Image (cartoon, rainbow, N blue to C red):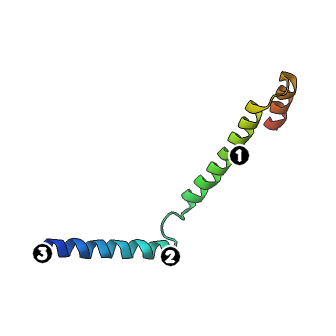
Amino acid sequence: MSFGTAVVVIFAIAAITWLRAQKQRGGLGTGPREAELEREVEQLRQRIAVLERIALDERGGDSLAREIEALRD
């Protein structure tokens, strides 16, 4: 094994060990910004589900308009 290869292997081992330690401590991806983004994604998923239900509903236009108005509240 050459010196360059040994340096790369040692660096890779150190990086993997550091990443695992950060993950176990909760240091990666657990900040307040990430929690806020998770909540926003969940809200958007709920909105998409409602829009899909409305778009695929086969009822008449009047009931659709009333349901949209009810969902705005």
**Callout 2 secondary element:** helix
Q: What whole-number distance in Å separates the C-alpha atoms at marks 1 and 2?
A: 31 Å
Which disc is residue 61 wearing? none
Residue beneath disc 1: 46
Q: Is residue 27 left or right of residue 16?
A: right
Which mark is first along the chain, 3 or 2?
A: 3
Identify residue type, mark 1: Gln
The quadrant in which the N terminus is found is bottom left
**10 relative position to 66: left or right:** left
What is the spatial separation of the Cα atoms under label 1 and label 3, in whole angstroms? 56 Å
Q: Are marks 2 and 3 in contact (CB under 8 Å)?
A: no
Sort mark 1 into few (<14), some (14-19) or many (20+) by Cα contacts within 10 Å: few
For the residues bearing labels 1 and 2, Cβ distance under 8 angstroms: no
In the depicted view, which residue is nearer to us: 58 or 16? 58
Marker count (numbered): 3
- Find the distance from the CA under tag 2 to the CA under tag 3: 35 Å
Q: Which residue is mark 3?
A: 2
Q: Residue at x 48, y 66 (%)?
A: 28
Residue under label 2:
25
| Vertical relation: 26 (above or below) 51 | below
Residue 34 screen position, x and y as percent: 55, 58
Give whichever of discs 1 and 2 has the lower sequence position: 2
Quadrant location of the C terminus in the rendered image = top right
9 relative position to 55: left or right? left
- Residue neighbourhood size for the residue with mark 2, other residues' Cα within 10 Å, grouped as few (<14), some (14–19), many (≥20): few
Type of amino acid under label 2:
Arg
Q: Nearer the viewer, mark 1 or mark 2?
A: 1
